[in-house]
Amino acid sequence: MKKMLLIISVVSIFLLGIVVCYAESRTEIKINGYKQMVNTFENINSDFKFYNMKANASLDKSLDKEEMKNICMEIISNLGLEECNLKWIESKKDTQSQVYAQIDEKNRNISIIVANKGKNESYIIVDILENKVYKDIVDIYTVVENTLNLYCKKVDVYTCIAGEYKKKLQLNKYDEILKKILYNMNAKEIDRVEDENFMSVTAFSKLIKTDYLEYLGNKVNLNIGIRYSENEEKTMVYIATPIIKLDY
C-alpha cells in the first residue's frame, strides 16, 4: 500500500512538472516574440511615439462590486502602480454592473474595466497607453497576461508600437521599411492595402507562435501600418500583434 502511494505521488509530481514546464514554455515563447518585436522596432530607426496594449478576458460567472474592485487593484498592484492615483467610476443598469478604474499620468494612461455582461458572464478589459518608454513592454505584457490568467485561461492581448519619421517618405521607402520588418520578424506577407500616403500589411510571423487570427483563410499575427500625416508633416509606422486595434 505504501509502495502504491509512493508511486502515485511520484507520478503526480511528474505530471505537475510537465504542466508547469509547458506553461512556462508557452510564456517564454510569447515573450521571445515580443522581444523580437522591440528589436525590430529599433532596427527601423524611427522615433518612438507610443505603445498601446489592449487585453481582454471573459469569465463564466458574475462578479459583485467588491470582486470587481479587487481585480482592478490586483492588476494595478502587479503593475507596480499606486492606489492613490486611481480614479474610480461605478455604474449599474439592470443586471449589468461595472467598475472602471483609471490612472491618467503625463506619459501614461491605464484604464481597467471589470463588468458583468449577463447573469453568469463577466469580462475584464485592460487598456494601456505609454508614450515615454517602450522597452518595458515585455514586462508589462507578462504582468497583464499572467494576472488575467488567474481568472481566465484564454486572454486576448493586442499590442502596437508606433514610431515616426519627421518627414514625408517616398513609397519605395515604405517598401524598404516593410521588408526590414518582415525579415526581422521572420514573417510572410498575407495581404496589403495601400495608396499614395498609406500602407497596411497583414502577415504571419513564425516568431509569434501562440496568438493569431484567421484572415482570408490564412493565419495572421502581425500587422504593419505606414502612413503620412499632412497635418503633422510626419510619417507614422506601426508594428502590432496580432492586428492594430486603434484608429490610424
Image (spheres, grey):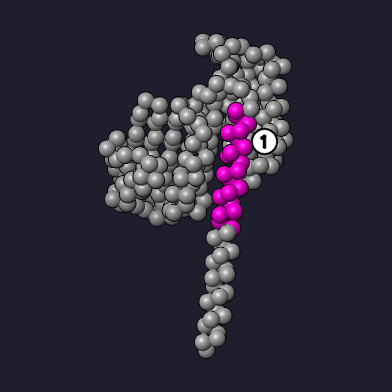
> Does residue 182 show up magenta in the picture?
no
Q: Is residue 113 visible?
A: no
Mark 1, residues whose alpha carbon is within 10 Å: few (<14), some, or many (≥20)?
many
Query: Callout 1: helix, strand or loop?
Result: loop
- What's the residue at 49%, 41% (across, down)? 139
Magenta-colored segment: predominant secondary structure: helix
Q: Nearer the viewer, residue 110 or 113?
A: 110
> Does residue 29 show up magenta in the picture?
yes
Which residue is farthest left? Answer: 84
Q: Position of residue 214 (x, y in %)?
A: 64, 42
Left of 184 or right of it: where is 37? Answer: left
**Quadrant the C terminus occupies:** top right
Q: Is residue 15 above or below residue 51?
A: below
Query: Which residue range is magenta in the image?
Result: 22-42
Q: Is residue 63 visible?
A: yes
Q: Which residue is mark 1?
A: 185
Q: Amino acid at mark 1?
A: Met
Q: Position of residue 79 (x, y in %)?
A: 40, 42
Q: Is residue 173 above or below residue 220?
A: above
Left of 193 or right of it: where is 15? Answer: left
Q: Nearer the viewer, residue 124 or 109?
A: 109
- What's the residue at 64%, 27% (across, down)? 43
Q: Position of residue 27 (x, y in %)?
A: 56, 50
- What's the residue at 61%, 48% (across, down)? 29
Give residue 235's quadrant in the image: top right
